[in-house]
Image (cartoon, rainbow, N blue to C red):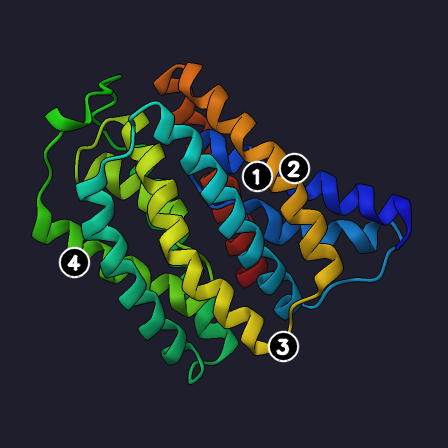
Amino acid sequence: MDMAWIITIFAVGFLGSFISGLVGIGGSIINYPMLLFIPPLLGFAAFSAQEVTAISAVQVFFSSLMGMLVFRKGNLLHKQLIGYMGGSIVIGSFAGSLISAFLPSAVINMVYAVLALIAAVMMFLPKKGSDATDVSAVGFNKPLAVVLALIIGGVSGIVGAAGAFITVPVMLVVLRIPTRIAIASSLAVTFISSIGSAAGKMMGGHMLLGPAVVLVAASLIASPLGAALSKKTNTKALQWILAALITATVVKIWISILF
């Protein structure tokens, strides 16, 4: 493997995993477009869309795991919320991945675009932006959490993403979970969701071992660094970073669909 190629893939994985740990999303929202466009821009062979989703699935598995472990030390994981949403999102994502086999690419892209647009709008709605970190004092609507996770899982299963970029806005706006607890718990839910998607991608035969190993190595370093910084960052700043990331993704997706 060419050293410049390894450095390029590592840098992509590092950035995606760092942001994953910082704002509680899986990282595929950043890694997917970067893996698709940056290697050919620098003169390297391009990955196919199937290869990128497979590599990203493995990276999301490790980056969400490492970020979750850092937040666990700070007692920010809401175990009850993770249990209700995690179990439901796995069922939804499995069903969604089965449905996606019967849908044309244009429909899948449109589902992804609408999902991202909803997430972006939600990030600009009033939120319970408190700095509360006492998990035991945070309640939530359990039936609503289960239904929402089932829907998120189903839609994210269709588009082949872990769904974390909509999980955080839903936790903040609908379930009224404080920012730091939402970010930490979202990483745990994303980790649970990514187990199925990573296993499915490996079985699908599109996994490239070399890039996957480089991305995982980047994840093991960058995700804990992002999570550690997240614990020290102002909650409003974290919300604005997440809003900016989701909005940029929405613009990119809708431009590609419309033009």
On the image, which quarter does residue 186 sit in? top left
**Tag 2 and tag 1, C-beta contact below 8 Å:** yes
In whole angstroms, how far apart are the C-alphas of marks 2 and 4? Answer: 33 Å
Q: Which mark is residue 154?
A: none
**Tag 3 and tag 1, C-beta contact below 8 Å:** no
Disc 2 designates what residue? 14
Disc 1 designates what residue? 17
Residue 64 at x, y percent in the picture: 46, 43
In whole angstroms, how far apart are the C-alphas of marks 1 and 4? Answer: 28 Å
Depth check: 151 or 181 in front? Answer: 181
**Tag 2 and tag 3, C-beta contact below 8 Å:** no
Amino acid type, residue under disc 4 in the picture? Val
Q: Nearer the viewer, mark 2 or mark 4?
A: 2
Depth check: 25 or 231 in front? Answer: 231
| Nearest to N terminus: mark 1 or mark 4 | 1
In whole angstroms, how far apart are the C-alphas of marks 2 and 1? Answer: 5 Å
Disc 3 designates what residue? 205
Sort mark 4 into few (<14), some (14-19) or many (20+) by Cα contacts within 10 Å. some
| Nearest to N terminus: mark 2 or mark 4 | 2
92 left or right of 37 in image: left
| Nearest to N terminus: mark 3 or mark 1 | 1
Q: Which mark is residue 147?
A: 4
| Rendered residue at 67%/56% (across/down) | 212
Indicate the quadrant containing the C terminus: top left, top right, bottom left or bottom right: bottom right
258 left or right of 146 in image: right
Circle 3 — which element?
loop
| Nearest to N terminus: mark 2 or mark 3 | 2
Sort mark 2 into few (<14), some (14-19) or many (20+) by Cα contacts within 10 Å. many
Residue 213 at x, y percent in the picture: 69, 53
| Rendered residue at 11%/25% (across/down) | 137
